[in-house]
Image (tube, rainbow, N blue to C red):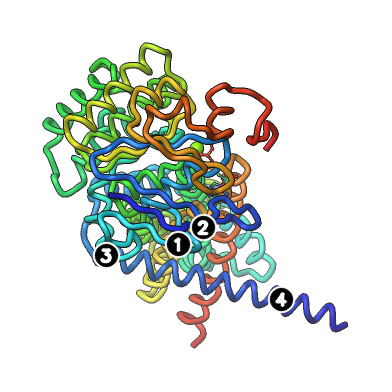
């Protein structure tokens, strides 16, 4: 018994220590945002990589999810003759929950993994050491541009995902379920409050920060060799996904628990 | 002047440096030799501050390397890494001109490219290499690009970690001459790690032999053949028998 408690305690302590380290790391990154130099070229490149190149995967995820959601809610609603509320529920579900969460998870899969692998490879091939000897701070040159790009582009991606998701639902609803196109869109639009949209974008911003930060953190703390890079990549995606889902719960309860 | 006093550095149970002491006077070329895995690369990383020492003191011109303005300190250094450590996300010329583009000088793209091409020429590479990516180059070419990057901003203190490893004898000769030239003409202080004894004779003023975490022998390069030190003698002859174990 004592043994079991001891090992649980150890796990908890280890988890708390990890949270502490990540928090410290986040503070360090943000501290470096405020002090020059700022590497504009790297930042633009990160905007392109994190934001623009993620559009296809975000669009596809959103359109299929919106479509499936309509079918599910229509079938569920039919059980108590509530087919008419499909557009409203799809809009709310997409904007409040599914849009941000799915985009966040796709970003964790696409962006976190690539940042972690890139930075870990740079670390094991001594490119980060080389950067330092060339008087360039890796926080400023590598981490700040990526994290800022995540904070800025992921909410935009979430916004795009929300809209595409609603249109994906609209497509299915009008083409195969016989909904009227105009009334469907009108109902979707009318049900949404400012709070829904703001919560969606805030979630996007937080998830973007988590995803990019985890990529940088795990990459920088990578072990040596190819195995080290592999572990760093895997760990970064796991951590980002779990943190995104955890943060989603916290943010949802902050925004909507009234 | 670079001075190491009783420097200790361990990685876990692996005690790499065990009270190493060494002085490298300004404007001279010191070559560190020693068996593979004895901590030669670690020494350079400790001096430049990439690794923190456990005990002891390292000073450059009298001031401790761990205190003071890091940027000003690093601006005086150039370091060639053993593996080249080129940035694979950018073309060769941007690698070479990295410091000129982003450092305090902030040259224009065109000027920086010109300097990069000139430095590439000095390490025996033609201008058409400038627009390739590191992954498109052979190992020896990558090493030379790394060398060009190291000397691009004309540093006062230069570390070369195995500059001629992987090069053919002619190219090795070119690089040896270049290192010698930088020390004699610009008055730079150089520390070079090499396993190539002809390279040692070509570039060293002073040779230091690292063994068991300390400087086992040090002296002017002329004394290398009659050092009287069994480690150095074994190293020169390449014999399997001697104080340096063949299996480490
Ligand atoms: N970052 C590190 N973490 C853990 N151990 C390290 C690290 N860097 C070096 N070592 C260990 O320190 C020892 C010395 O390494 P170092 O790279 O300095 O050897 P070296 O003398 O340069 O050898 P070579 O001639 O083969 O390049 C090795 O046993 C190595 O495993
Ligand atoms: Mg080495």
Number of residues whose C-alpha sits closer than 10 Å to that of mark 3, classed few (under 14), some (14–19) or many (20 or more)? few
Horizontal and vertical percent for residue B193?
43, 34
Helix, strand or loop at disc 3?
Answer: loop
- Say what secondary structure mark 4 lies in: helix
Which chain is disc 4 placed on?
A: A
For discs 3 and 4, the disc positioned in front in the rendered view: 3
Label 1: how many Cα within 10 Å (few below 14, some 14–19, many 20+): some
Task: Respond whether the residues carrying marks 4 and 1 are from the same subunit.
Answer: no
Q: Position of residue A18 (x, y in %)?
A: 57, 69
Q: Which residue is mark 4?
A: A10
The residue that disc 1 covers is: B56
**Dividing the image into 4 quarters, which one contains the N terminus of chain A?**
bottom right
The answer to whether marks 2 and 1 mark residues whose Cβ atoms lie closer than 8 Å is yes
Task: Give the mark, 3 or 1, whose residue is nearer the N terminus.
Answer: 1
The reply to the same-chain question for discs 3 and 4 is no
- Residue under label 3, please give it: B68
């Amino acid at each position: 018994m004592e043994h079991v408690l001891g090992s649980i305690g150890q796990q908890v302590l280890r988890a708390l220590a990890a949270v502490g380290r990540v928090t410290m790391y986040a503070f360090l990154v943000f501290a470096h945002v405020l002090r020059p130099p700022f590497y504009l070229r790297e930042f633009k490149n990160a905007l392109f990589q994190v934001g623009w190149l993620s559009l296809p995967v975000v669009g596809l995820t959103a359109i299929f999810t919106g479509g499936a959601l309509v079918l599910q809610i229509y079938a569920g609603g039919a059980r108590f003759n509530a087919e008419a509320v499909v557009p409203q529920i799809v809009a709310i579900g997409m904007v409040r929950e599914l849009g941000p969460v799915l985009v966040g998870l796709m970003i964790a899969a696409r962006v976190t993994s690539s940042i972690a692998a890139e930075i870990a490879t740079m670390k094991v091939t001594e490119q980060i050491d080389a950067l330092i000897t060339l008087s360039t701070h890796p926080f400023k040159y590598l981490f700040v541009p990526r994290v800022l790009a995540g904070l800025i582009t992921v909410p935009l991606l979430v916004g795009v995902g929300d809209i595409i998701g609603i249109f994906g639902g609209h497509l299915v609803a009008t083409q195969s379920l016989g909904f009227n196109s105009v009334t469907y869109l009108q109902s979707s639009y009318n049900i949404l409050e400012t709070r829904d949209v703001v919560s969606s974008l805030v979630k996007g911003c937080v998830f973007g920060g988590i995803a990019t930060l985890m990529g940088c953190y795990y990459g920088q703390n990578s072990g040596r060799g190819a195995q080290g890079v592999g572990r760093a990549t895997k760990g970064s995606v796991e951590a980002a996904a779990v943190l995104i889902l955890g943060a989603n719960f916290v943010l949802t309860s902050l925004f909507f628990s009234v | 002047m670079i001075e190491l006093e009783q420097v200790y550095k361990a990685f876990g149970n692996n005690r790499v440096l065990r009270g190493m002491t060494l002085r490298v006077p300004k404007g001279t070329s010191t070559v560190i030799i020693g068996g593979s895995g004895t901590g030669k690369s670690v020494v350079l990383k400790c001096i430049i501050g990439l690794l923190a020492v456990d005990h002891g003191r390292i000073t450059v011109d009298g001031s401790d390397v761990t205190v003071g303005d890091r940027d000003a300190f690093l601006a005086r250094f150039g370091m060639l890494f053993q593996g080249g450590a080129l940035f694979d996300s950018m073309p060769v010329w941007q690698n070479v001109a990295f410091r000129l583009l982003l450092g305090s000088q902030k040259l224009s793209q065109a000027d920086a490219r010109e300097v990069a091409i000139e430095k590439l020429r000095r390490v025996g590479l033609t201008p058409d290499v400038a627009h390739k990516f590191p992954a498109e180059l052979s190992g020896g070419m990558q090493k030379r690009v790394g060398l060009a990057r190291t000397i691009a901003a004309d540093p006062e203190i230069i570390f070369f970690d195995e500059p001629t490893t992987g090069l053919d004898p002619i190219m090795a000769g070119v690089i040896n001459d270049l290192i010698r030239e930088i020390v004699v003409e610009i008055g730079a202080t150089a520390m070079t790690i090499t396993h190539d004894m002809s390279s040692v004779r070509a570039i060293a003023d002073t040779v230091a032999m690292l063994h068991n975490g300390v400087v086992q022998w040090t002296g002017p390069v002329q004394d290398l053949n009659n050092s009287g030190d069994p480690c150095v003698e074994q190293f020169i002859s390449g014999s399997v028998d001697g104080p340096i174990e063949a299996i480490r």
